[in-house]
Image: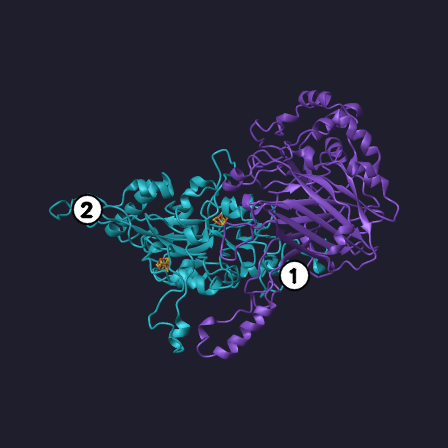
Chain colours: A cyan, B purple
């Protein structure tokens, strides 16, 4: 276990599915060099097939006894979708092979192939919500447990889970072991890669790109042991933020405020059925477990309290008046770590991601 | 009867080379340069071919569902091995049957390539027992040459350095320059997956990237089989052999999702360098057939509770506590087995796999060292240990 743990809370009531976070991450980390198909951050429509396809059925994670479960490694074409490109070159350069804009392959699958479809009959009781997902930087990571090369490590300083690219030889057991399928294989360099929680930004006191860019301002970032932080309050004080599929036994450190509101259903005459709700609670139970009931109860109670009395710390937190209020990164913490270890405070605190945990000068043992 | 025969034959080193299993073979001395030797070289007609048995490495079960299924009924495999040397370099050839050619797809996440590896013991001066096969042991390093089947793909500098790619959207504007750039890239394109590692125990295996090992490996697929060759110096910063070179051979089958520990592996094989005095100690270790009685050994293993933690019988559930022994006899030397019984902490397979979960650790860390939770069986008399070793040596699947 790491000394401290960084965590993120995402308020699903506020996510508008705009994919700004996806683009922020993609342009920053995974736009090329074998990472084209990777979405370290993706936002899927729930219920839906998700990305990769049916990730919840691909195994990994731990059973109740703590044993790592076998998993399946998704196929790039069928399960992630080939990252296609368009014929910009010929169109823009006037060397048109045809005068239409077309993809270079015929896509058969891709992330968000079923965007906004959801479930239920349209229009009377159709429903869905958006589920943004990043690596959960788990406390008991399935990816780490599965790696026979000891190439995955959890940073002491903040619990960020990283791949030691020097040790990784592309065996991909980590992908089978992660129940969220949030670790990816780069076929060009034959190594695994994953969300790094933007650690170079974090170390300079900046939130991860997905969180900073988020249009819906749904993302809170902070240390779980910092009682002043929003994540502490949402996770531990009010217990309204819950890990996704905690039943996988990985102890995820990305938490979600479950969606509380959904429109009522229509009857055969097109009239609202009073008191009905489209979003079945079973769906939320599947994602967040039984804790979702208490979470929703608390959220509703605080909403009511706010309406009646005008006071609710929880509502103030969730409203997030100032964007900067959403991140408590203790800028000086990392400077302190650097100082204690006599390292350059501007360089990443931990160079293993680049240099390799076991690499010593010259490559000798 | 066969056991007795093996024992008798292994006393004569040269004679045992014809036998599959625990053996030594001869690197024929030639005067030619070997640095460009490949599967096609005419020089191999001078070599002596021997058969070596490779066994599935099953100490640890990995968590890939499809791979587990594909490797369920794995058998051992015979490979042909030959070696040449010229006093400064050694060339080793390994030939094995493989019904399917598998090359890692550059646009695929769930395919795997065929491959092979040769492992050399770092130094044979103080080699007994020889290092742990696969990772080496503390103070007893190994050098691993790994070659995977690859095909050419687009890479900017052929150096696995992918940081210099350019924006393809500009073709229309900089068409000519880009075409030239592409031509240059194509001429450099080479993703030969040849890597050299040095290891001194689990989790120390490190790639040698400074080009200080002058080796050349290649693979060729023909007639439903692979031929892999490797040339390397007899002496460099990492290995120094005199007379006899201990080597272990591994092959991977991409069709069965083989990679890492999902492989077929030989025990230590002693390669005697023709023209120089063989290192008898190394040969003896590689070819040792335990003097014990396997039947008595089985009983001793039962009464001493080995099956409490280890999976010994394949039909028993995989132990969650200790490495599986179902194939241990195939790729382990008698010396290694004896060492593990007497000094369980000498080599400890680390956790982080399906069989080693947090609640039942098979080792603890003391002063930075892995200490096995296995009982030290040095209280057993020598004869019983030999019997257990003889029994463990019988634990292996059939060879096809
Ligand atoms: S979400 Fe997956 S990749 Fe991320 S730490 Fe957990 S197990 Fe590893
Ligand atoms: S940027 Fe924010 S609101 Fe938009 S999809 Fe991402 S998480 Fe949702």
Would you place residue A221 above or below residue A286 in this image?
below
The reply to whether the C-beta atoms of the residues labelled 1 and 2 are less than 8 Å apart is no
Residue visible at 56% across and 48% down? A2
**Residue, disc 2:** A265
Looking at the image, tell me whether mark 1 or mark 2 is earlier in sequence order: 2
Q: In which quarter of the image is residue B3?
A: top right
Q: Quadrant of residue B213?
A: bottom right
Chain name for mark 2: A
Q: Is residue B290 visible?
A: no
Q: Nearer the viewer, mark 1 or mark 2?
A: 2
Identify which residue, B275 or B384, lies in the foreground.
B275
Residue visible at 36% across and 53% down? A44
Q: Could you give the CA–CA distance between mark 1 and mark 2, rounded to whole angstroms?
A: 62 Å
- Point out the residue furthest to the left here: A269
**Residue, disc 1:** A342
Chain name for mark 1: A
Q: For mark 1, give the secondary structure.
A: loop
Residue visible at 37% across and 55% down? A108
Q: Position of residue A105 (x, y in %)?
A: 40, 61
Would you place residue B142 above or below residue B75 in this image?
below
Would you place residue B98 above or below residue B206 in this image?
above
Q: For mark 2, give the secondary structure.
A: loop
Q: Is residue A257 visible?
A: yes
- Crowd band around label 2 with a 10 angstrom C-alpha radius: few (<14), some (14–19), many (20+): many
For the N terminus of chain B, which image quadrant? top right
For the C terminus of chain B, which image quadrant? top right
Identify which residue, A310 or A359, lies in the foreground.
A359
């Amino acid at each position: 276990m790491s000394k401290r743990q960084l965590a993120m809370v995402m308020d699903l009531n506020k996510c508008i599915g705009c994919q700004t976070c996806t683009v922020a991450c993609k342009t920053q980390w995974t736009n090329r060099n074998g990472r084209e198909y990777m979405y370290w951050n993706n936002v899927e429509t729930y219920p839906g097939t998700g990305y990769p396809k049916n990730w919840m059925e691909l195994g990994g994670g731990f059973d109740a006894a703590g044993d790592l479960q076998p998993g399946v490694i998704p196929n790039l074409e069928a399960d992630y979708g080939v990252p296609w490109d368009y014929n910009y070159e010929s169109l823009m350069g006037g060397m048109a092979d045809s005068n239409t804009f077309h993809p270079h392959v015929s896509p058969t699958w891709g992330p968000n192939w079923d965007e906004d479809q959801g479930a239920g009959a349209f229009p009377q009781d159709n429903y869905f919500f958006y589920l943004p997902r990043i690596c959960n930087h788990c406390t008991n990571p399935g990816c780490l447990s599965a790696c026979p090369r000891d190439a995955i490590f959890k940073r002491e300083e903040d619990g960020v889970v990283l791949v030691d690219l020097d040790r990784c030889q592309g065996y991909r057991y980590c992908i089978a072991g992660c129940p969220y399928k949030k670790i990816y294989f780069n076929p060009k360099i034959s190594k695994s890669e994953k969300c790094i929680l933007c650690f170079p930004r974090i170390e300079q006191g900046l939130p991860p790109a997905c969180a900073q860019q988020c249009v819906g301002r749904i993302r809170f970032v902070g240390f779980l042991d910092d009682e002043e932080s929003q994540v502490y309050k949402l996770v531990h004080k009010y217990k309204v933020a819950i890990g996704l599929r905690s039943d996988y036994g990985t102890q995820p450190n990305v938490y979600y405020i479950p969606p509380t509101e959904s429109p009522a259903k229509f009857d055969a005459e097109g009239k609202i059925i009073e008191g009905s709700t489209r979003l079945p609670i079973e769906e939320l139970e599947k994602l967040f477990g039984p804790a979702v009931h208490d979470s929703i109860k608390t959220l509703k109670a605080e909403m009511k309290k706010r309406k009646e009395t005008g006071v609710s710390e929880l509502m103030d937190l969730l409203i997030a008046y100032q964007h900067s209020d959403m991140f408590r990164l203790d800028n000086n913490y990392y400077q302190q770590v650097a100082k204690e270890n006599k390292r350059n405070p501007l360089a990443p605190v931990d160079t293993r991601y680049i240099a390799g945990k076991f690499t010593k000068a010259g490559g000798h043992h | 009867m066969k056991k007795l025969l093996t024992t008798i034959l292994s006393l004569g080193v040269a004679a045992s080379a014809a036998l599959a299993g625990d053996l030594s073979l001869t690197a024929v001395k030639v005067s030619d340069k070997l640095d460009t030797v490949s599967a096609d070289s005419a020089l191999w007609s001078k070599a002596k071919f021997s058969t070596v048995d490779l066994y599935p490495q099953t100490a640890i079960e990995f968590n890939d569902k499809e791979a587990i299924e594909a490797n369920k009924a794995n058998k051992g495999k015979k490979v042909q091995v030959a070696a040449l040397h010229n006093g400064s370099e050694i060339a080793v050839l390994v030939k094995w049957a493989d019904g399917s050619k598998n090359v890692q797809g550059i646009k695929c996440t769930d395919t795997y390539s065929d491959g092979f590896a040769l492992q050399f013991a770092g130094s044979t001066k103080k080699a007994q027992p020889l290092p742990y096969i696969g990772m080496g042991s503390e103070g007893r390093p190994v050098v691993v040459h790994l070659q995977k089947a690859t095909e050419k793909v687009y890479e900017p500098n052929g150096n696995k350095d992918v940081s210099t790619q350019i924006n393809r959207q500009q073709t229309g504007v900089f068409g000519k320059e880009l075409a030239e750039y592409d031509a240059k890239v194509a001429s450099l394109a080479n993703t030969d997956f040849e890597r050299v590692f040095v290891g001194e125990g689990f989790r120390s295996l490190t790639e040698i990237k400074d080009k200080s090992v002058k080796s050349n490996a290649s693979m060729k697929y023909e007639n439903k089989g692979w031929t892999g060759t490797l040339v390397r110096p007899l002496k460099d910063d990492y290995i120094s052999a005199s007379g006899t070179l201990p080597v272990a051979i591994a092959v991977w089958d991409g069709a069965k999702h083989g990679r890492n520990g999902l492989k077929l592996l030989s025990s230590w094989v002693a390669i005697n360098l023709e023209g120089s005095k063989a290192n008898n100690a190394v040969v003896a270790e590689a070819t040792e057939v335990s003097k014990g009685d396997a039947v008595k050994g089985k009983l001793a293993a039962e009464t001493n509770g080995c099956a409490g933690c280890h999976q010994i019988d394949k039909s028993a559930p995989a132990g969650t506590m200790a490495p599986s022994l179902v194939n241990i006899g195939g790729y382990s030397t008698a010396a290694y087995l004896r060492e593990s019984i007497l000094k369980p902490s000498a080599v400890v397979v680390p956790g982080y796999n399906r069989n080693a979960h947090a609640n039942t650790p098979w080792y603890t860390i003391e002063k930075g060292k892995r200490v096995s939770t296995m009982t030290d069986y040095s209280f057993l008399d020598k004869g019983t240990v030999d019997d257990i070793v003889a029994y463990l040596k019988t634990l292996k699947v059939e060879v096809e």
